[in-house]
Image: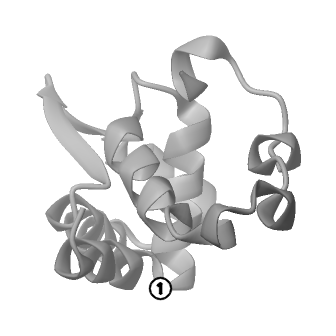
Amino acid sequence: MDDEIAVTALAALAHPDRLAAFRMLVKAGPNGLPSGEIAGRLAISPNRMSFHLTALERSNLVSSRRAGRHILYAASYEAMRKLLAFLTEDCCGGRPEICGDLGALLPDCTEDVCQ
């Protein structure tokens, strides 16, 4: 990942509604959620949610697919892993005791989402 891609992804997450939607999609798993459900759960108007989901999709952090009349959005776990790796690749300067076990800070998750 290069700096430009990382900045685009971080900029997409730099809004409370987009960050909340992304975190919801990460929790939802690979099947994702319909845009209307995301909007409803976050108490955001569908038009505004569509705007935010489009920004997340442009950053490649989420993908969309049509299912009948609905558009389903899902987190891109590969893009998320690449962003996290980019942010931590220079961590520690060869001294892993500085960063510690970052994985230990994460709550338990299912294998299909975290692997």
Residue extending furthest toward the front: 94
User: Mark 1 belongs to which amino acid?
Assistant: Ala
Can residue 83 be seen?
A: yes
Quarter holding the N terminus is bottom left
Residue 100, x across and y down, in percent? 85, 55
Q: How packed is label 1: few (under 14 Cα within 10 Å), some, or many (20 or more)?
A: few
Q: Say above or below: 69 vs 44.
A: above
Can residue 69 be seen?
A: no
Residue 60, x across and y down, in percent? 21, 56
Is residue 74 rendered to the left or right of residue 66? right
Q: Which is nearer the eye, 98 or 86?
A: 98
Residue 67, x across and y down, in percent? 18, 23
Question: Exactly how many numbered labels are in the figure?
Answer: 1
Residue lying at 40% horizontally and 78% vertically, measured from the top left:
10
Residue extending furthest toward the top: 111
Residue lying at 41% horizontally and 24% vertically, measured from the top left:
30
Is residue 41 rendered to the left or right of residue 64? right
Residue 53, x across and y down, in percent? 29, 63
Residue lying at 69% horizontally and 69% vertically, measured from the top left:
92
Q: Which is nearer the eye, 36 or 8?
A: 8
Q: Say above or below: 91 vs 27.
A: below
Question: In the picture, residue 97 is in which quadrant?
Answer: bottom right
Q: Secondary structure at mark 1?
A: loop
Is residue 102 rendered to the left or right of residue 72? right
Is residue 14 rendered to the left or right of residue 61? right
Q: Which is nearer the eye, 112 or 69?
A: 112
Label 1: which residue? Answer: 14
Task: Indicate how the structure is coloured in the image.
Answer: one colour
Q: Say above or below: 85 vs 34.
A: below
Residue lying at 45% horizontally and 75% vertically, measured from the top left:
13
